[in-house]
């Protein structure tokens, strides 16, 4: 996919339609700050992100960027729109409507929206973003490249599925029932086995149900016994029936149940207090850690100020989880006590309401039990499962226990038959619970196993993600290392790579070797310039992986903090690794633009220049000149000294590159001064050597190019007089600045062939250089 | 297993995850695994499931180890 043109109309800095004609080629666009370079990048982002430009989204830009996207001086009725053309008639078109909604059309609109912004565009402010991201953010940024999104979704769904099975199968409730059944069994049968209990039931069965065959399993036997005893109770007289029910009430252990809830609450409180204190401490540490995690993996201990490894903090959290396990047991104990109390109160309520005890109840009501009986009628027993404060406990203890005591007194004279039926009924109920406990225990175990399977599968999926992430990021790391070696061939910063930190999920980080020492983050040692070049390598490595050699990449002023040497290497990097991709570079750096033009002079790249921005109505416009004197020219009227200074700086840079290509012999200067020579120095050498070396073809002969030498001399004289004045005393008038710029332009033009438009340094010959057509030679 | 099969197996994350997790569970859960494999190759990998769909999936999964007659009281 190659972009042919990006056209803007009243979009950002653009006014009337302006088009960046790329023709599917790699291109360098130079323009000073504010000239409108980023408007083209914004346009691409606007299309890719469906009407969104991240850096413009703020409180003043409007919900749909309607205050930021259109040119501030857009005439009413005109449209703010973007068109991106591809080969053939393919196009993506998008209009920012008045209310900010982005209306898109064109065959390439949908495909462009699948482009990943972070692998297509790199802006100056985003170069180090990946490095500064947290491990989790790095993972998220890489996730689409890893191709593991469906595994991530599956792992999270498995996690949620396990929690849902737990709730759908009421696991906690089943476990509580099981605990109660086991407690009832122990109370009646002690440590007797199931066989012992069944024998006891068989014995009762032969006594109550003589001759009845039926099923011999425990639960059926219990059902037979229950029916038989209920039949016998129904034959009792009214007084005996009342005594049987009162015996039920007397057996309720309300007071003891209240005490158990109270004791469990105290234990929970005792356990919870240090836990809460610990939790606060952990949360404070975690807060500190989280703040620090965006930068480093080590944190300063909030207590002692020492540096703590993340691993140590994990141990801290593990201790907390262990404590949580302990507190959960205490919590369950209290919950069971509350459940038991609830069941006790419900049983009391149910028995006291029975018609068999109506006369007893009426008698109590006439006595001093009116209030306790009203309390019993009104109390919502089920609410005790959720909340049971001391006030309620006191009420239960003070009002309901006396009712139980009254029933105990009244049933003390129960005849032996009634007592026996009651005792046997208790045995049958406990046996029935014991027989049910087995299957229930199996069911609880099965639910726990199922949840365990889901947890194991989630972990196995996460492990797969980890393995596969590592495999993909190893490949990306290889590209990063290659690119880093090109940019920094002799630097003892090596083995730059992405890695999956141990013991964490959804995390990726960057490691490297710094002068032989392994570093777990580039932020520990790398300078800003190195971090920038690493950020560029990472972007390019990910862009390379994203779409192979297909989609274009756009670099918007990304080399600001790189020095000249490393900037030069970027071209080598792009030519080696991105020679089949369309690369579009936007830069405000005049020197780098000049260097790029020299380095990429074989015609594979094209160069464009934006005029300085005048005002929103004029908008973005293109310059026609081959060298960037436009910038200087724009300042002649208001800032002539600055214009003169710009012209001199342009000459410094242009001549340095030409001098290098012509292999001019210049005296050695110390260190970086070699790279900071002035135009005057180059011109002197060009003139001196040029008298013998610079030839031009006149018909079939090559003659000395005296005319060019004169032109260089004129420029040199003006640079020495006015150029230096412009730089140092600022004492230069517009006419002088204009004449200086014109002389400089002519000087550079004299080194360029009028026929083929190439510099005399364009191609090497056996004894020097020449332009493309051979009309100019340097011998 | 041929090299091609091994490569295919390595690329099949569902098979690989199942193979890693399965040996750690007791026998008798074969149907659970079969159903889980189907789920992983289908709905579970497509999008985050909403609560309603999770409940359906959880109930179906549990039904493979709890036939209808043993559904606990709380379910009825």
Image (cartoon, rainbow, N blue to C red):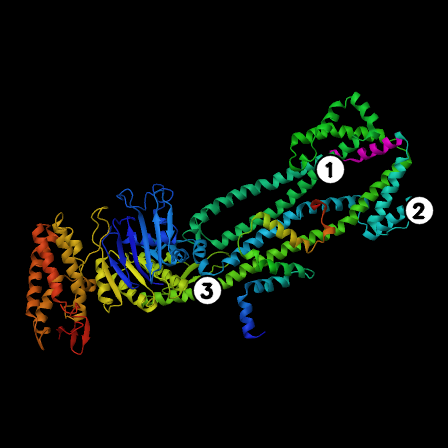
Neighbour tally class for label 3: few under 14, some 14-19, many 20 plus, Cα within 10 Å: some
**Please, is residue A616 above or below residue A530 in the view?**
above
Does residue A398 appear in this view? no
Are dots 1 and 3 on a single chain? Answer: yes
- Identify the mark at residue A472; answer none if there is no mark: 3
**Picture quadrant where residue A739 is located:** bottom left
Q: Which circle, 1 or 3, is nearer the viewer?
A: 3
Could you tell me how far apart the alpha carbons at marks 2 and 3 are, in whole angstroms?
77 Å
Secondary structure of residue under mark 3: helix
- Identify the mark at residue A210; answer none if there is no mark: 2
Chain containing mark 1: A
Secondary structure of residue under mark 2: loop
Q: Main secondary structure of the magenta part?
A: helix
**Picture quadrant where residue A117 is located:** bottom left
Q: Which circle, 1 or 2, is nearer the viewer?
A: 2
- Residue A207 lies in the magenta stretch: no
Precedes in sequence: disc 1 or disc 2: 2
């Amino acid at each position: 996919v190659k972009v042919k043109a990006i056209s803007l109309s009243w979009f950002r800095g653009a006014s009337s339609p302006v088009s960046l004609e790329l023709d599917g080629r790699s291109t360098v666009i130079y323009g000073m700050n504010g000239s409108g370079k980023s408007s083209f990048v914004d346009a691409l982002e606007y299309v890719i992100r469906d009407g969104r430009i991240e850096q413009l989204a703020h409180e003043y830009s409007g919900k749909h960027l309607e205050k930021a996207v259109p040119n501030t001086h857009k005439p009413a009725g005109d449209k703010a729109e973007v068109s991106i053309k591809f080969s053939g008639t393919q196009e993506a078109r998008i209009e920012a409507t008045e209310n900010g909604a982005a209306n898109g059309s064109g065959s390439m609109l949908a495909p462009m929206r699948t482009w990943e912004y972070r692998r297509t565009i790199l802006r100056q402010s985003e170069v180090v973003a990946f490095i500064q991201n947290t491990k989790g953010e790095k993972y998220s940024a890489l996730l689409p490249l890893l191709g593991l999104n469906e595994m991530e979704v599956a792992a999270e769904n498995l996690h949620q599925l396990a929690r849902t099975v737990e709730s759908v199968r009421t696991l906690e409730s089943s476990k509580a029932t099981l605990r109660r059944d086991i407690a009832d069994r122990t109370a009646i049968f002690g440590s007797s086995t199931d066989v012992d209990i069944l024998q006891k039931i068989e014995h009762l069965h032969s006594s109550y149900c003589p001759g009845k065959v039926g099923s011999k399993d425990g639960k059926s036997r219990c059902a037979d016994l229950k029916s038989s005893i209920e039949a016998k109770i129904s034959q009792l007289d009214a007084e005996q029936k009342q005594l049987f029910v009162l015996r039920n009430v007397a057996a309720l252990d309300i007071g003891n149940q209240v005490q158990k809830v109270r004791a469990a609450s105290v234990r929970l409180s005792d356990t919870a207090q240090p836990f809460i204190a610990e939790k606060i401490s952990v949360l404070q540490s975690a807060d500190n850690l989280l703040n620090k995690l965006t930068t480093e993996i080590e944190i300063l201990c909030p207590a002692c100020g020492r540096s703590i490894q993340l691993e140590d903090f994990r141990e801290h959290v593990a201790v907390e989880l262990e404590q949580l396990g302990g507190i959960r047991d205490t919590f369950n104990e209290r919950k069971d006590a509350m459940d038991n109390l609830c069941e006790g109160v419900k049983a009391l309520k149910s028995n006291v309401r029975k018609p068999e005890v109506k006369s007893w109840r009426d008698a109590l009501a006439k006595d001093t039990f009116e209030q306790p009986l009203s309390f019993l009628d009104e109390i919502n027993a089920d609410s005790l499962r959720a909340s049971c404060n001391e006030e309620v406990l006191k009420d239960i203890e003070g009002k309901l226990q006396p009712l139980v005591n009254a029933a105990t007194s009244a049933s003390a004279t129960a005849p032996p038959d009634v007592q026996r039926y009651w005792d046997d009924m208790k045995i049958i109920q406990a046996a029935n619970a014991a027989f049910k406990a087995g299957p229930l225990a199996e069911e609880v175990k099965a639910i726990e196993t199922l949840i365990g399977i889901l947890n194991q599968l989630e972990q196995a999926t996460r492990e797969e993600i980890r393995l596969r992430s590592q495999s993909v990021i190893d490949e990306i790391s290889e590209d990063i290392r290659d690119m880093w070696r090109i940019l920094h061939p002799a630097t003892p910063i090596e083995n730059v790579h992405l890695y999956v930190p141990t013991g964490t999920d959804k995390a990726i980080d960057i490691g490297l070797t710094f002068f032989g020492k392994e570093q777990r983050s580039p932020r520990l040692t790398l300078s800003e310039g190195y971090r920038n070049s690493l950020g560029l390598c990472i972007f390019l490595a990910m862009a390379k992986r994203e779409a192979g050699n297909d989609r274009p990449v756009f670099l918007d002023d990304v080399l600001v903090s790189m020095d000249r040497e490393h900037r030069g290497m970027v071209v080598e990097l792009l030519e080696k690794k991105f020679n089949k991709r369309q690369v579009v570079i936007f830069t405000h750096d005049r020197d780098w633009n000049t260097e790029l033009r020299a380095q990429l002079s074989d015609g594979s790249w094209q160069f464009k220049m934006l005029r300085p921005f005048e005002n929103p109505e004029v908008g973005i416009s293109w310059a026609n000149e081959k060298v960037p004197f436009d910038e200087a020219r724009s300042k002649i009227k208001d800032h002539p000294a600055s214009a003169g200074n710009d012209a001199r700086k342009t000459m410094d840079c242009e001549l340095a590159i030409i001098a290098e290509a012509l292999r001019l012999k210049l005296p050695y200067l110390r260190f970086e001064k070699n790279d900071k020579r002035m135009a005057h120095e180059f011109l002197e050498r060009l003139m001196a050597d040029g008298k013998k070396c610079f030839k031009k073809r006149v018909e079939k002969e090559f003659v000395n190019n005296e005319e060019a030498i004169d032109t260089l001399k004129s420029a040199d004289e003006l640079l020495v007089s006015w150029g230096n004045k412009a730089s140092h005393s600022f004492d230069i008038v517009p006419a002088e600045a204009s004449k200086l710029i014109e002389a400089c332009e002519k000087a550079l033009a004299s080194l360029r062939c009028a026929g083929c438009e190439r510099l005399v340094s364009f191609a090497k010959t056996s004894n020097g250089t020449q332009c493309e057509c051979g009309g100019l030679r340097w011998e | 297993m041929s090299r091609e099969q091994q490569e295919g197996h390595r690329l099949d994350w569902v098979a690989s995850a199942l193979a890693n997790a399965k040996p750690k569970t007791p026998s008798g859960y074969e149907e659970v695994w079969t159903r889980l494999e189907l789920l992983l190759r289908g709905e579970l990998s497509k999008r985050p499931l909403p609560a309603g769909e999770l409940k359906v999936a959880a109930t179906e999964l549990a039904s493979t180890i709890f036939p209808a007659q043993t559904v606990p009281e709380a379910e009825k």
